[in-house]
Amino acid sequence: MTCLTIFQAKAQKCNLVLSGVVMDASNNAPLEKAVVEIKELGLKFITDIEGHYHFYNLCKGSYTIVVNHMSCDSIKYKLTIQQNVIQNFKLPHAINELENVSVNAKRDLNVNSIKEVLSSKVVDATRGQSLGEVLSRANGVTVLQTGSTIFKPVIHGLHSQRVLLINNGVRLESQQWGTDHAPEIDPFIAEKFTVIKGAGALRYGNDAIAGAVLIEPKALPKQAQTNAEFNTGYFSNNRQYVVSGMLESSPVKHPDFSYRIQATYKKGGNARTPNYWLHNTGLQEFNYSVSAGLRKEKYNTEIFVSSFNTDLGIFIGSHIGNLSDLQNAIQLSKPLQNIDAFTYTIGRPKQNVQHYTLKSKSQIYLPNNSKLNLLFSHQRNLRKEYDRALLSNRPELDLEICTSIADINYESSSNKKITSNIGAVAMLQENVWAGSRFFIPNFRTENIAVYSIHNYNVNNWMFDAGARFDYRHLTTYRNQSDSVSSADRSFGNMSGTIGATYKISPHFKWLINGAYAWRAPQVNELYVNGLHHGTASFEIGDPNLKSEKAINLSSQLKYQTDSSWQFDLGFYNNIIDDFINLTPSVPATLTLRGAYPTFRFVQSNAVLRGIDFSVHKILNRSWMAGAKTALLWAKNRDTKEWIIQMPSNRIEGDITYSFANKILPNAAIELRYMHIMQQTRVPLSIADYIPPPNAYSLLNLDFSSDVVVGKKQFSVGLTVVNLLNQTYRDYMNRFRYFNDEPGRSINLRIKLKL
Amino acid sequence: MKQLKVGIIFATFLVLMAACSKGVNKPNNENEHEAINKIELVFTETGGGSTSFVIEDPDGDGGNPPSRIDTIKLNSNKQYTLTVKVFNIVSGVIKEVSSTILAQATSHEFYFIPSGVSVTIQKTDKDKNGYPIGFLSSWQTAGAGTGSILFKLMHKTALKGPNDGPNVGHSDIQLNLPITIK
């Protein structure tokens, strides 16, 4: 049908364009995934994140437009087209419809922070990959890697505790301090990934100095709906397969009740560089989650339980005993400590991590369009790291951390112009170690916070301001030679944000944002004392560290038209006082195993500034091209030197060809080119074992489409990563000393909706 | 409102669950490392008596350097048999763990690399694959001198071969031991 229409259109020289935005009538928020249909032509367009839709090559005439969205009533509209038309649609909310989770999350945010929502196309294309890999598709986000299995998101050069991960409304609390500790979140749980760049996420914490990521599932199904979705994927490089299933329902007999169950299983073997296999780099993951919700006229409540379990192999050639082992390994272009063969078996060294989350969330509707949100959560994280089996099979590192959070929040928007959000958060956390080697002590943290955030809309301006006070009390318990001692530290401080957005035109906006954030030193920074095998270093904390403080200024210009240009230009300047960083120190630490370089946590003043820029041009019905770049300058203001281990500058270009026919109604082929420059901004006074790796370029090719076979429809995707099978190493991979990055991988994914 | 009350009770319960199952205020002893923290080198002269040399590092992988490193003292132009013994000391209790390492003999090997002294060293024990281990070795000294022995225990799960160099695997022990041959 689509094909026919196009031919007809060409024959009649029809070249009119219908475009516009679909919005929610109640708050003018753009609606993603609304379906705009031209009845007479059978043409459909699903709106993007900004609510945009467009149809090209239309003939003059009268048409019936039907607009549908899952959480709104549909509307029908008669339209006569004589010339190019821009037509916006406002959809009324369905009666009895209660706002879904993602709409709430939007309200929680500081509206004027720089955000990037991953498009559903990117989300689909990265299905089966780890959270870090998914998030790295946002501009300005990179990953800190440990080998080929462990990915940590890095926003504007910062990571770990400086990036908050909000999983379904709950801030992830695990051993997030570790550079080789990947976030314990299954991306299949979520449908929407929002990266907040800069310290704007006041609602979720004072410590998001770099930014925050919101990982949100879709809303539970509504009255008498039942949906199921099945995803599967295969990754040729490490022969990894993934299966994920989801079932959700709202029973006909109890339309106010709904539930969802979801599970993912993943298993991969050794990864392969263009020239050799990497022994012991397999992974295995099993995750599940259950949620259930009740929607009533005056309140709604939801319970969510999730379990994340993973086994991660650590490349055998990266596992070294001491400094001379490390130097021996570095000298080789191909790792000596390796078995060049494929296997799914995972042996030591490895990590085994389990993470459990229990959450209850309720909203109570109050008069005057205000709401009370109650959120309680409990998380339990068990991390076992196995270095070597020498005297027993016990893990060397064995940590259990439990966190309970109570979050009470009052939202009011009594008039259309002002919305307010005030709240209080209490958190209690306990950590216990049990491994065969001491690394961080037992501790208990008590945290309380109050905050108040206000938004004000007038004409084309949108302002926001927020303040938050946090108090943290930390007690550590240590046992040195069978006598237990405890130590207390307290930290308290204000944080705040202020921002404004000006709509220069409906397609063009300018945003400016300032934030003050602080972060109390974490237990590892204060008290760590032990060997870190992955890096052959001996890490020593400093119990007298002060809190880290950041003043973050950012600005964004964003232009987006329906059918032609889109660009997004962001600047940031993050001034951090008392920046805590692991820094080499002398003398080396001597043990029976040999010498290890000593690293201490020290504080200095830093500044991180950079530019994120992206541009897209829709060339015509079939072709679209884009480019983006992320640039970062990170300096130590005291020594005037560059800061070590920061992502290098990068540029990307992509070109997409779209086509459609009877079997493939919305096919797209994308070729993506990435160029990662060599990191030349490294400190001269801190010697690295080897200089940063050379620049490299990668080509990725992606095909995706829905497929119609008879009456059945499913989605397929085929991606070739590292198309040219490049041999390269990356500065942000801690295993750059030992091995090359994986070579070409052909990845297939299939999604079936029932 | 009944459900709401149930919800609030449930939430309170959640908060009370904060405690981890193990006691946070009863930490393990940080100095108890499951590591080799004492080594004894027993030299037996062919047709003569035995002498022991000891290396100790009570905090194991901890940050303090070894507390005792004896100088190996041997006579010139003599034949010795060396027996290596490794120990784990926890809270003053000394436990010999040589048999634990011997049980993993197919993934371990000792190395003795002399420098500055003239001594010929031959490993005399073999694992079940017929590859050298090094708990037992014969030492033939030549002339007098002073130097050092690089003493290593290499851990090489799945990597061990019959004639590995001293850098295969990762180091479980690496020490430079002073030696005097009179």
Image: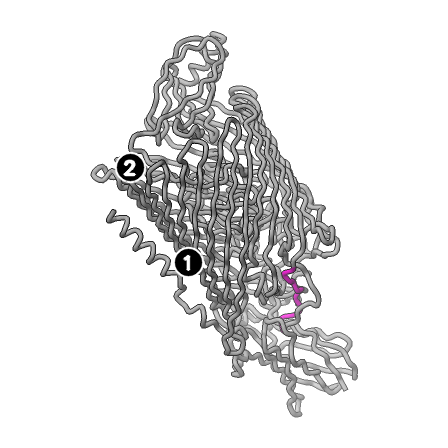
Question: Quick check: can you spot residue A152?
Answer: no
Tell which of B20 and A14 is nearer to you: B20
**Residue that numbered label 2 is attached to:** A226
Residue for point 50% across, 63% down: A474
Residue for point 61% across, 53% down: A734
Question: Quick check: can you spot residue A416?
Answer: yes
Q: Residues within 10 Å of mark 1 (few under 14, many from 20)?
A: many
x and y percent of residue A661 in the render?
43, 21
Q: Is residue A81 above or below residue B77?
A: above
On residue A380, the disc is 1
Q: Residue furthest left?
A: A253
Q: Is label 1 in a helix, a strand or a loop?
A: strand
Query: In the image, A639: left or right of B19?
Result: right
| Amino acid marked by disc 2 | Thr
Magenta-drawn segment? A592-602
Chain for numbered disc 2: A
x and y percent of residue A594 in the render?
65, 70
